[in-house]
Amino acid sequence: MEGIINFHHDLMFFLIVVTIFVCWMLFRVITLFDEKKNKIPSTVVHGATIEIIWTSVPALILLTVAVPSFALLYSMDEVIDPIITLKVIGSQWYWSYEYSDNLEFSDEPLIFDSYMVQENDLEIGQFRLLEVDNRVVVPTNSHIRVLITASDVLHSWAIPSLGIKLDACPGRLNQTSMFIKREGVFYGQCSEICGVNHGFMPIVIEAVSLEDYLTWLKNKINFDFNA
């Protein structure tokens, strides 16, 4: 996930450099080669040196971009034994989550829905349109497998700060993985237009230590089954 974010930063550097160079060249062409300053057009039709440069430099840039992108594609498909499997189901207009690796605490998996907190119910420090009533809590420094689907229409489970964006398609199961290195709260939203309330399907992932995660899991299971 962090590799995707770092790759984006590196790619943005090349985009800025190329954009500045192209704009500079256009400015020079417009100001130096107008009709008044060049009444007699140039008869030069080709140049071996410049053709080699404008062919080799873009090829080198593309190669520099392609090599790490291929490595990222390979790492995204790499299968690592996860300690947690998180199942995500997108619905109009909320998310449902299932933890199925808690059988040592309960005979049934932990399942809950996550709705956006209405503006009137927000507490101090919470973000409008981004806070939910049930956060997804996961441990840090742990391999987590995410399985996602939808129950009605297309959705998209996206957390930009984690480099995750996965489509939720009815009748289809998509998979990705997470490995969060630092504790914190990460916000996301549905990124596929799914109806009138598409903009009200936030995602909140809270990354905590493994000890705090186990404590949360026990309390969540006891609360849900006693409710």
Image (spheres, helix red, strand yellow):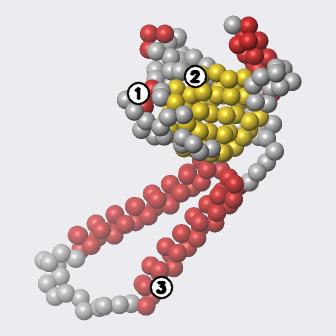
When asked about the image quadrant of residue 213, the answer is top right
Vertical order, 208 against 126 (above or below): below
Q: Which residue is mark 1?
A: 197
Image spot of residue 112 (x, y percent): 64, 21
Image spot of residue 81 (x, y percent): 81, 45
Q: Residue at x 64, y 63 (%)?
A: 70
Image spot of residue 47 (x, y percent): 39, 90
Image spot of residue 172 (x, y percent): 59, 45
Q: Which residue is mark 2?
A: 114
Q: Is disc 1 placed on a helix, strand or loop? A: loop
The mark nearer the N terminus, 3 or 1, is: 3
Q: Amino acid at mark 3?
A: Ile
- CA–CA distance between discs 3 and 1? 54 Å
- CA–CA distance between discs 2 and 3? 57 Å
Tell which of 22 and 127 is nearer to you: 127
Q: Which residue is mark 3?
A: 52
Q: Residue at x 72, y 28 (%)?
A: 99
Tell which of 19 and 100 is nearer to you: 100
The mark nearer the N terminus, 2 or 3, is: 3
The answer to whether the residues at label 2 and label 3 have Cβ atoms under 8 Å apart is no
Tell which of 167 and 135 is nearer to you: 167
Q: Amino acid at mark 1?
A: Asn
Tell which of 177 and 151 is nearer to you: 151
Q: Residue at x 45, y 26 (%)?
A: 200
Residue 188 shows in this picture:
no
